[in-house]
Image: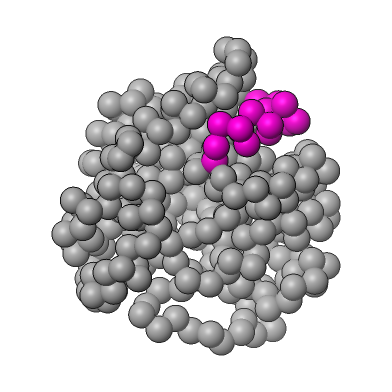
Amino acid sequence: MFIDTHTHLGGFPAIEELSDVLLTRNDVASWRTKYPEIFERIQREEPVDNSAALLEAMDKNGVDLTVVQPTPGISNDFVRSIAQRHPGRFLPLAQATEWPWGAKPSYELPDPGTPERVARAADRSVNELGFAGIGETNTQSITSHVDPRLVANDFAPLMDVLAPRRLPIQFPSGWTQFPGNLHYQDPLWVDELAGRHPDVPIILTKMGRSIQRYFDSCLTVALRNHNVYLDVVGTSVDHLRTALNALGPDRIMFGTDWTYTWRYLRAPDDVHSTAIRLVKAAAINQDEADGIFGRTAKTVFSIN
């Protein structure tokens, strides 16, 4: 089974106006500040279902199952309703935290009751609504601490929800298209969290996104904690090969980060072809390829 563990469903009509200019990685990374009028418009628009485009990309590239989650501006309910219409093709993750959304994002610090509220919402998502885990989490919306011990204290209620069923949670590393949280995307602090909650699979998405300092942190945390996994989104051949040598293929998963912006990437290639080519360039044997393309994801996400 070929599994993509990292995509975001939902889009907005205005972004389609940029389909001819979102060609390269740099185009996508900077679109929000380069085209602020488009970003402002999509905040007033109703989201649209772009799952047909994702299914087409999956079929084109031989992907059997895709793990899907919301993106800023898209709700859990929106993603869940799409996933329910495509059983066997989409496996939904819930968003436990708010990501900055708006031309003027809020700079208010989370209040003391936030960790418990987040945990209650996550509990409903995974234990009542059928989500398979928690997607990329905005750490600064749960905690204002920088000491890893205090950050881990604030995450304890959420992790306690996930631990009994060994449900996974994702934390982004490197950079994102959206403002804030960059301090926490150097994931060295995750070492404290992983050590306290060994029954919760923690996925450091993007493996540092080809930036050496972030990759070093990802690998250091994964080496110390067997419940920490990496995905291949945005990484380099050298970093993936180093991670394979250090961790083996049963700690690394395939992902594309297909979204309403990354779907338009085509220079030098689309996100699926780019990620597949990356893995094939780094994996030196079939066992490594099998682990990355599906075996590890089946274990982490309990896919039968």
Residue at 18% across, 51% down: 20
Q: Taking 252 as reference, is 142 above or below it? A: below
Does residue 189 show up magenta in the picture?
Answer: no
Q: Where is residue 135 in the image (x, y as percent from the top left)?
A: 53, 53
User: Quarter of the image containing the C terminus?
Assistant: top right
Is the magenta region chiefly helix, strand or loop?
helix
Residue at 34% across, 67% down: 32
Q: Position of residue 111 (x, y in %)?
A: 64, 85
Residue 51 lies left or right of residue 277; in this view the side is left
Residue at 76% across, 47% down: 221
Q: Can residue 163 be spotted in the picture?
A: no
| Part of the protein shown in magenta | 235-249
Q: Taking 247 as reference, is 117 above or below it? A: below
Residue 193 lies left or right of residue 140; in this view the side is right
Residue nearest the observer in this picture, 224 or 240: 240
Residue nearest the observer in this picture, 288 or 214: 214
Residue 112 lies left or right of residue 125; in this view the side is right
Q: Position of residue 301 (x, y in %)?
A: 58, 38
Q: How many labels does the image show?
A: 0
Residue at 79% across, 40% down: 223
Residue nearest the observer in this picture, 185 or 96: 185
Color theme of the render = one colour
Q: Position of residue 208 (x, y in %)?
A: 60, 49
Q: Give the image quarter of residue 16.
A: bottom left
Residue 274 lies left or right of residue 113; in this view the side is left
Kindly give the residue lying farthest to the top in the view shown: 286
Residue nearest the observer in this picture, 75 or 108: 108
Q: Taking 288 as reference, is 232 above or below it? A: below
Q: Can residue 235 be spotted in the picture?
A: yes
